[in-house]
Image: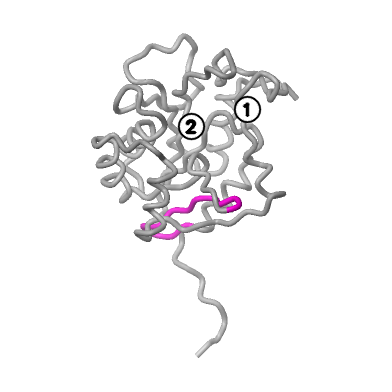
Amino acid sequence: MSTGQVRPPAAPARSAGLVLAGGASRRMGSDKALLQVGSERLVDRQVRILREAVGDPVFVGLPFGDSVAWPPPSGAIEVRDSQPDCGPLAGIVAGIEAADAGLLVVIAVDLPRIHPDWIRSLLDRCRTGVGAVPVVEGRLEPLAAAYPGSSLSSARVRLQSGRLSVQEWAREGLEAGWLEPWTLTAGEAEILLNWNRPQDWSPA
């Protein structure tokens, strides 16, 4: 019998992507999705990055019931938060429901350093029925993670009961076994830098 390390089963063949763009952007003072990165809007960049790494479909999560005064990225599918004023958990629920896929890769719109190879590394840590979430110094990064379709029921329960913390939901996933941790060093975690305030943004 071989004593080599056994490679876990491959990630589900059918995956989808979701860009969470339904936040109010209060600290930024303007819609973060429309910030320019080179020649692209940030939301267009995130959709492109996901499509390069995951393929189609790619969804863009928008606020419940609101009309957004900007055109959606070409080829992306709009989904609305499943409930109003419930934060990113409502967007993730809507994304899992719409995708109906084995795995949903979720990235927040305000993470401008994420690139396709990073997402592929995230997918490499997934297997059938099990997603992955980055961990930095003990803190989870659930808005740059991959969730299995089977996580939908627990997310719905939390949403319906008003337990809206995505951090707590992801920890539940680790305990239940439908998420695996991906531990990042402080240097590796710099890719998860987010743009929250005007001084964070750089158009380069």
- Rendered residue at 51%/22% (across/down): 73
Q: Position of residue 143 (x, y in %)?
A: 49, 39
Q: Is residue 57 above or below residue 117?
A: above
Question: Which image quarter: residue 11?
Answer: bottom left
Say left or right for 78 vs 199: left
Q: Earlier in the sequence, mark 2 or mark 1?
A: 2
Identify the residue position indicated by label 2 in the image: 19
Segment tinted magenta in the rendering: 126-137
Specify whether residue 129 is painted magenta: yes
- Rendered residue at 58%/36% (across/down): 49
Residue located farthest toward the top when viewing the structure as drawn: 69
Q: Is residue 95 above or below residue 79?
A: below
Say left or right for 61 vs 109: left
- Assign a secondary structure to mark 2: strand
In the image, 194 versus 53, the foreground residue is 194
Residue located farthest toward the right when viewing the structure as drawn: 204
Question: Which image quarter: residue 182?
Answer: bottom right
- Rendered residue at 57%/13% (across/down): 30
- Rendered residue at 72%/21% (across/down): 203
Q: Position of residue 91 (x, y in %)?
A: 38, 31
- Assign a secondary structure to mark 1: loop
Q: Position of residue 161 (x, y in %)?
A: 24, 37
Q: Amino acid at mark 1?
A: Trp
Q: Which quarter of the rendered picture does the C terminus lie within?
A: top right
Q: Position of residue 129 (x, y in %)?
A: 36, 57
Label disc, if present, on residue 195 of the rendered structure: 1
Specify whether residue 45 is painted magenta: no
